[in-house]
Image: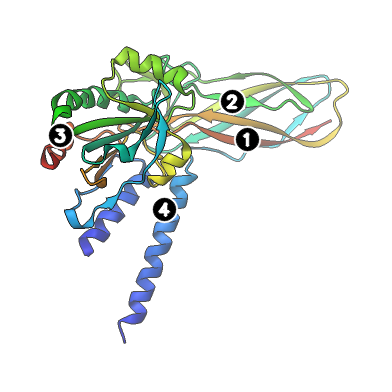
Amino acid sequence: MRLRFLAVTALLAGLGAGCSSTTAAKGDKVRKPAPNFTLQDASGNTVKLSDYKGKVVLLDFWATWCGPCKIEIPWFMEFQRKYKDRGFTVLGVSMDEGGWQVVKPFAEEYKMNYPVVLGTDETGTAFGGVEVLPTTFIIDKQGRIVVTHQGLTGKDEMEKTIEDLL
Amino acid sequence: MRWRRPLKTCCSLAFLFVAGAAAQVQGIHYVSLEPPAAVTARRGSEVEVPLRFIIRGGHHINSNHPAEDYLIPTALTWTPGALTPKGVGYPKPEAVKYDFSEKPLLVWSGGIVLTSKFAVAGDAPVGPGKLSGKLRYQACNDRACFPPKTLEVSVPVTVQ
């Protein structure tokens, strides 16, 4: 109990200070369901988070104006290449106010190889208020949040979590 | 029974802490305006209004001309009123290399002074009023970025 309180305190303190932080990976019994959303991809197709149940999902909130996000995107493309055939996907949620007009050229330039949707304020709120970018959730095959990374954190740590869940 | 009161107090404090932190996160600003001095403006003249903005420790904001196209520039804009905005002077930015950027970015951190120029019409209404403006900025630290924000700016002005 004390450890959990300390973890929450550290996360909130990190949020207030605007630092990067990572929640401890949650054990199977205490994971909470990720909120579902229905958003659109660049082609206008509807994308629901619930469509990915049965897969491990790395859900990345990002924006084109976010420098640290641009460091992580190549990592995520590598994860997508490496693990997509093992029941894994990356799903990018862009929080750009400029919409597809800015996101589409960016995705093409970076040759992003995973689905990207446009997020809304409601999407951010549903996930606890995404005020820090990048914010990355790793979601298990049952659609539950296992770990949350805020700010630029470690590639190896994320990859280990993905491998453990596959 | 004796444990109930401490437990209740502890829960209340925890609730206040979490609620406070949540409110802080929702409405958080990374730039604040030092209380501006009142401005006196004479009809038919021009007046300069320097404003000092404080950027939260450990953070930076992009300059008005960032080094990269993808970055959101800082801009101070004014609503036309009794005084007509004639432009804003921005300080020289620092070139800082961050781990997340390939080349140095042109940013401001600490405190900056933005000086706005206004023309006062010869027939401007005499008396007290205010200048209303907005500072649009986007802040980051060395590990994360934060959504663009708009800080409302208000400066008391008296036209003579």
| Residue at disc 3, secondary structure | helix
Q: Which residue is drawn at 40% across and 17% down?
A: A104
Q: In this view, does A163 lie above or below A40?
A: below
Q: Is residue B15 above or below residue B85?
A: below
Q: Do the residues labelled 3 and 2 touch (CB within 8 Å)?
A: no
Dot 4: chain letter: B
Query: Marks 3/4: CA distance?
Result: 30 Å
Q: Quadrant of the N terminus of chain A?
A: bottom left
Query: Marks 1/2: CA distance?
Result: 9 Å
Residue identified by numbered label 2: B76
The image quarter containing residue B36 is top right
The image quarter containing residue B154 is top right
Q: Nearer the viewer, residue B37 or A35?
A: A35
Labels 3 and 4 within one chain: no
Image x and y of residue B102, in percent: 28, 16
Q: Residue at x 43, y 62 (%)?
A: B16
Residue identified by numbered label 3: A159
Number of numbered callouts drawn? 4
Dot 2: chain letter: B
Amino acid carrying mark 1 in the image: Val
Query: Marks 3/2: CA distance?
Result: 42 Å
Q: Of marks 1 and 2, which one's residue comes earlier in the chain?
A: 2
The image quarter containing residue B85 is top right
Q: Residue B153 carries which label?
A: 1
Q: Are marks 1 and 2 in contact (CB under 8 Å)?
A: yes
Q: Which tag is nearer the camera, tag 4 or tag 1? A: 4
Tell me: B157 left or right of B24: right
User: Residue at the right extreme?
Assistant: B123
Amino acid carrying mark 2 in the image: Leu
Query: Marks 4/2: CA distance?
Result: 29 Å
Labels 1 and 3 within one chain: no
Residue identified by numbered label 4: B21
